[in-house]
Image (cartoon, helix red, strand yellow):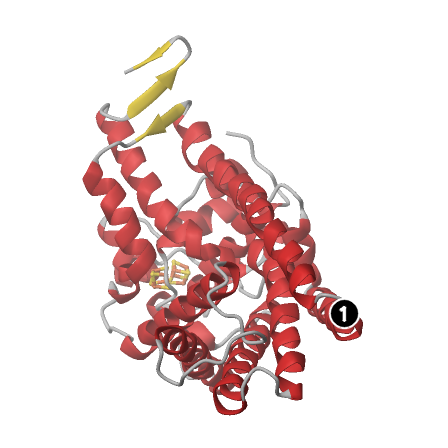
């Protein structure tokens, strides 16, 4: 296997940790709940980073199973921050899977990402505010482009992750067709059940994470399925669409608020280190949730003709557009797809080891 002596320096550009302090004691492996299946995790990835095993790191799926319980960091006698190392590896892998190279630029330059996002946000807001024609038609064009954009961006990511995690290490195109594996993949995607695999279950963090994720997905569905037309219709406070909107907005605010407070007070291992992209994520999240709630409140209470409503709604659409174009595909949000995929790829690897994986071969399959 080829060795890259500069690998650890490259990984360090994605976040703060001090793996050079590691003296290989194995405490982190002993406490890590993931070590049930792999006796040397997370230590084996620390070692791989140390010695420059780039392919091993690129093909690893363990960082996606790790939900940063922080038990490894809390027990590390050298304060090498193995939990943060896993977080940094997730950023590194996102950049690795991304064919555009933008993730790498954003993560490495930190605040550039924030300023670029805010600049784009301002530009979109200006565009929407000064647009005097048919606002609905303009929004419609952007929404039309959304599925195409997401398919290309997400498709590229998924294929590249598959290439690194399955095709390269297993030497071919392999898959698991077992319904139980596909079912488990979806269960992990919707419930993030590995979150509670740690010895001390952090229920608040799991609930907050679930609220934010469900609130976001719902917000995007509300916008892109045209469930909400606040400039044309007058909604009642507790109709079906209103209930979805209240839930989406409040879930983002409550879940995001709880996660932000943890970052501010750094009262858990998982919130001790914050990358600029984490704050960008939180700020954008609040803006989306708050503008959605205010838009709907104005509609329900005053009707669609209220002059402030159109402005707040435009702001909401502008932020969501920046979010979709810039933040969702190139930063941590994309992990929502990688975590369940990692569960599925783990099954594929196990089946490949057992010789039972579906294998696509030139001229046929078995
Ligand atoms: S507990 Fe710390 S020093 Fe020990 S192997 Fe893990 S990272 Fe290294
Ligand atoms: S943060 Fe938790 S799950 Fe992740 S490597 Fe450390 S002990 Fe394991």
Of 292 and 332, which appears nearest the observer?
Answer: 292
Q: Secondary structure at mark 1?
A: helix
Where in the figure is residue 104, as x and y percent of width and height? Answer: 65, 52
Of 45 and 182, which appears nearest the observer?
Answer: 182
Q: Residue at x 39, y 65 (%)?
A: 68
Ligand 2: give its quadrant: bottom left
Of 124 and 135, which appears nearest the observer?
Answer: 135
For mark 1, what is the residue?
Answer: 119
- Packing grade of label 1 (10 A; few <14, some 14-19, many >=20) is few
- Note whether ligand 2 is within 8 Å of mark 1: no
Q: Residue at x 74, y 65 (%)?
A: 116
Furthest residue in direction bottom, as rendered? 301
Where in the figure is residue 57, as x and y percent of width and height? Answer: 48, 43
Furthest residue in direction left, as rendered? 180
Q: Is residue 225 visible?
A: yes
Q: Quadrant where the C terminus lies?
A: top left
Where in the figure is residue 83, as x and y percent of width and height? Answer: 42, 64
Which image quadrant for residue 135?
bottom right
Q: Is residue 42 visible?
A: no
Of 126 and 241, which appears nearest the observer?
Answer: 241
Which image quadrant for residue 310?
bottom right
Where in the figure is residue 25, as x and y percent of width and height? Answer: 35, 58
Q: Residue at x 52, y 84 (%)?
A: 299
Furthest residue in direction top, as rendered? 363
Residue 233 against residue 142 in the figure, above or below: below
């Amino acid at each position: 296997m080829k060795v890259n002596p500069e690998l650890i320096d490259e990984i360090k550009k994605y976040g703060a940790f001090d793996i050079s302090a590691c003296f290989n004691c194995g405490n982190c492996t002993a406490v890590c709940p993931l070590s049930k299946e792999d006796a040397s995790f997370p230590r084996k990835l620390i070692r791989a980073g140390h010695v420059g095993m780039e392919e091993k790191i690129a093909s690893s799926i363990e960082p996606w199973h790790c939900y940063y319980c922080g038990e490894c960091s809390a027990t590390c006698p050298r304060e090498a921050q193995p939990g943060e190392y896993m977080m940094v590896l997730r950023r590194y892998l996102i950049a690795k899977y991304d064919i555009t190279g933008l993730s790498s630029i954003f993560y490495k330059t930190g605040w550039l990402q924030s300023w670029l996002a805010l600049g784009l946000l301002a530009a979109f807001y200006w565009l929407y505010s000064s647009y005097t024609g048919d606002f609905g038609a303009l929004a419609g064009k952007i929404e039309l482009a959304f599925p195409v954009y997401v398919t290309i961006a997400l498709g590229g990511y998924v294929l590249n992750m598959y290439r690194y995690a399955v095709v390269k290490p297993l030497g071919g195109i392999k898959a698991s067709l077992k319904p139980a594996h596909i079912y488990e993949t979806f269960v992990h995607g919707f419930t993030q059940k590995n979150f509670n695999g740690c010895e001390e279950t952090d229920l608040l963090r799991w609930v907050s994470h679930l609220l934010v994720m469900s609130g976001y997905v719902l917000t995007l569905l509300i916008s892109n399925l045209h469930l909400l037309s606040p400039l044309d219709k007058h909604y009642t406070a507790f109709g079906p669409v209103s209930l979805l909107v209240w839930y989406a907005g409040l879930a983002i605010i409550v879940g995001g608020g709880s996660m932000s407070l943890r970052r501010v007070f750094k009262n858990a291992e998982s919130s001790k280190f914050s990358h600029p992209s984490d704050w960008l994520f939180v700020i954008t999240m609040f803006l989306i949730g708050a503008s959605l709630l205010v838009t709907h409140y104005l509609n329900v209470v005053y009707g669609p003709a209220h002059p402030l409503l159109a402005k707040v709604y435009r702001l909401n659409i502008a932020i969501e557009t920046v979010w979709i174009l810039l933040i969702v595909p190139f930063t941590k949000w994309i992990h929502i797809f990688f975590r369940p995929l990692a569960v599925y790829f783990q099954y594929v690897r196990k089946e490949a080891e057992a010789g039972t994986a579906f294998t696509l071969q030139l001229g046929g399959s078995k």
